[in-house]
Image (cartoon, rainbow, N blue to C red):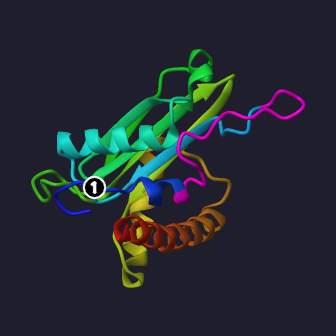
């Protein structure tokens, strides 16, 4: 993304979210709408300037349309997470709690490029937890990534049934997310 917002990322964002611009609400025979209840968007290596963040918020809002409102936007360095909720569900949702996880001390990295953001809330009594991470890259640093995941787990006080199963599942998830994020980022930047 660089130091300035992209000229037009709305087309790529529409494709990424499988939406059409200002998609109208359509109901089936049961009266259910075709729109997702929420979107959670995580961004990495996005500058934290107020101008760029505001540009992103406006761009995302224009793609999602008037049926959605921003429930929470949180930033940790160059890592951003946002939750967009269907407007009519706003009154059935609790306040969003945010927990930042920093991988490096401030003195070592003033920009804070590595870390995690956890966002949690309840909607109709169901608990949701979303974790956006940006961890050490490259296959050679797998052990470092696993240690960083352990740190996230400890700070958030998450419990896993078995360490070995969670390590295997988390490793697969990290590698898949890393590959998917690289592809998605490339698509957005190309447009």
Residue 15 x %, y %: 54, 59
On the picture, is 67 further left or further right than 3? right
Q: Relative to 57, say whether 177 is above or below.
A: below
Residue 115 colored in magenta in the image: no
Where does the image place residue 115, in percent across and percent down from the top left? Answer: 33, 54
Residue 38 horizontal/vertical position (percent): 59, 37
Q: Is residue 17 magenta?
A: yes
* Quarter occupied by residue 98: top left
- Outermost residue toward the bottom in this view: 140
Residue 58 spot, x, y in % from top left? 35, 38
Query: Residue at image x 51%, y 44%?
Result: 40
Magenta-colored span? 15-32
Q: Residue furthest left?
A: 107
Is residue 191 something one can see in this rendering? Answer: yes
Q: Label 1: which residue?
A: 46
Q: Residue furthest top?
A: 91
- Image vertical order of residue 122 relative to residue 185, above or below: above
**Residue 36 horizontal side relative to residue 157, left or right:** right
């Amino acid at each position: 993304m660089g130091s300035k917002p992209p000229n037009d990322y709305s087309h790529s964002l529409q494709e990424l979210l499988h939406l059409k611009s200002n998609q109208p609400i359509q109901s089936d025979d049961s009266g259910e709408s075709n729109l997702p209840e929420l979107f959670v968007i995580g961004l990495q290596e996005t500058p934290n300037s107020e101008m760029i963040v505001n540009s992103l918020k406006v761009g995302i809002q224009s793609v999602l349309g008037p049926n959605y409102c921003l429930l929470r936007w949180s930033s940790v360095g160059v890592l951003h997470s946002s939750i967009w909720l269907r407007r009519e569900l706003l009154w059935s949702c609790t306040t969003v709690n945010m927990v930042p996880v920093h991988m490096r001390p401030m003195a070592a990295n003033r920009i804070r490029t590595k870390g995690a953001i956890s966002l949690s809330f309840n909607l109709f009594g169901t608990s949701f937890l979303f974790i956006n991470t940006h961890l050490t890259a490259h296959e050679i640093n797998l052990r470092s990534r696993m240690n960083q995941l352990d740190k996230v787990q400890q700070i958030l006080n998450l419990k896993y049934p078995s360490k070995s199963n969670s390590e295997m599942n988390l490793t697969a998830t990290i590698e898949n997310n890393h590959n998917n994020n690289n592809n998605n980022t490339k698509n957005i930047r190309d447009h």
